[in-house]
Image (cartoon, grey):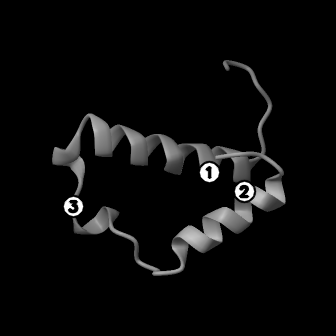
Amino acid sequence: MIGEKVTPEENARDQVAAFTVHVSRYRPDLDGPWTKTPDPALADHLDELTELLGTDA
């Protein structure tokens, strides 16, 4: 929502989620080696971040 107050962490989470959905569903041509998971535990880290924020990603 425009004007909604969010923390930098919430913004980062939302940007990652939006990019992931957008690229996977609408722009697979934007995907490349630079968008792959650099850390095999990234999903676990994002789950932990979501839990710490107390929201669903």
Report if the CB atoms under discs 1 and 2 are less than 8 Å apart.
yes
Q: Nearer the viewer, mark 1 or mark 2?
A: 2
Q: What residue would you read off at disc 1? A: 13
Q: Earlier in the sequence, mark 1 or mark 3?
A: 1
Q: What residue would you read off at disc 3? A: 32
Tell me if residue 50 comes above or below residue 14 in the rendering: below
Horizontally, is 7 left or right of 21 in the view?
right
Tell me if residue 18 comes above or below residue 44 in the rendering: above
| Residue 14 location, quadrant | top right
Circle 3 residues within 10 Å: few <14, some 14–19, many ≥20: few
Residue 50, numbered label: 2
Separation of marks 1 and 2 at Cα, in angstroms: 8 Å
Circle 2 residues within 10 Å: few <14, some 14–19, many ≥20: some
Q: Earlier in the sequence, mark 1 or mark 2?
A: 1
Q: Nearer the viewer, residue 31 or 47?
A: 47
Circle 1 residues within 10 Å: few <14, some 14–19, many ≥20: some
Horizontally, is 31 left or right of 42 in the view?
left
Tell me if residue 35 comes above or below residue 8 in the rendering: below
Q: Amino acid at mark 3?
A: Gly
Give SS at disc 1.
helix
